[in-house]
Image (cartoon, rainbow, N blue to C red):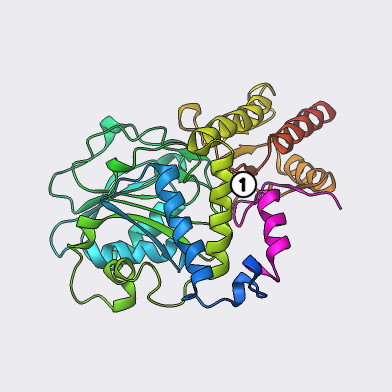
Amino acid sequence: MTRAHNFNAGPAALPTEVLEKAQKELTNFNNTGMSVMELSHRSADYEEVHNNAAALMKELMNIPDDYEVLFLQGGASLQFSMLPMNFLPEKAPGNYVLTGSWSEKALKEAEAMGPTKVGGSAKETNYTYIPAFDSLDMDNDDAYVHITSNNTIFGTQWQDFDYDWKAPLFADMSSDILSRPIPVERFSVIYAGAQKNLGPSGVTTVIIKKSLIENEKSGVPTVLKYSTHSKANSLYHTPPTFAIYMLNNVLEWIKANGGAEGMEKRNKQKSDTIYAAIDESSGFYTGHAEKDSRSRMNVTFTLPSEDLTKAFLTEAKENGFIGLNGHRSVGGCRASIYNAVTQESCDALASFMKKFHESNR
């Protein structure tokens, strides 16, 4: 059976080479006679995988020495709670910039922990754009600023981070981490669920300044403190060993394919291919995001009618295209083109879109 053209929003496509490597090693990892899933997380064989994954994250993202790389559980959604639990004081507000559903959920969790404010929002247009820097309400007295770098549901993405944020900057990068180079030193916390660009679901990467950990609040349960995991090399309790093994293999694949710079070039070409099919359709396809806020990870678009949308999705599935249904809050269609999605799949989708347009003028 040929591989599907996988445009799922997450869990998402993984590199074929990574899957084949895991398949080959599944019952006998590193000549142990066991699967990596069967190894003790205290064993030398597993710890080598674990430590190599952290070292690769540091190398590929140019993470400075004053940051920790942690491998946690609970997805990005647990970070919505853990961050304010540890770093939101009783008086200074957490400042949230709203660019989609996930930033709304992060704000909701913070509201249960302490004072918050909204420093910018695109909600009035159903999140078609990223707020301009000069429209943001930032203050030196903010406890921190929280952003979502890429918005999977709405197909928008922060194009850069070159701004005076006033307070420590926290970013949910679940859907675009390692899709491009970023200035890590501008952030105090970067966190990301792995299941879009880094590996399978089950592990969350947290990149956090050591000085921030030193100032976490008291009274937080042990397993929800960043210092607990920092001191234990993310081995305080049993980690998701297979997910970290897969993450390590994906990072090796990213390194072999040009690192963050290589991913950026690859992702630009892929997204340009699909956006061209939208822009050259004379309005048959309409992008949800404004052009200067377009995501290179999630291409969202609508068709002229619900009937045409249903026909498009049905025919697409028949032709091997998976995961193109848009989220219910936007409707239409969505092509998620994370790192592992190939140019060939994007070319095939663009070709299908053009043929469907020609057949339904």
Tell which residue pokes out farthest to the front in this image: 31
Relative to residue 326, is residue 303 depicted above or below? above
Q: Can residue 185 be seen in this view?
A: yes
Identify the residue under disc 1: 331
* Position in image of residue 308 (x %, y %): 76, 40
- 189 and 330: which one is in front? 189
Q: Can residue 304 be seen in this view?
A: no
Left or right: 102 in relation to 19:
left
The quadrant holding residue 162 is: top left
Residue flagged by tag 1: what amino acid is it? Answer: Gly
Residue 211 magenta-highlighted = no
Q: How crowded is mark 1: few (under 14 residues within 10 Å), some or many (20 or more)?
A: some
Of the 4 image quadrants, the one containing the C terminus is top right
* Position in image of residue 166 (x %, y %): 18, 41
* Position in image of residue 287 (x %, y %): 59, 33
Left or right: 358 in relation to 23:
right
Q: What stretch is highlighted in magenta?
A: 1-29
* Position in image of residue 68 (x %, y %): 32, 56
- 57 and 267: which one is in front? 57
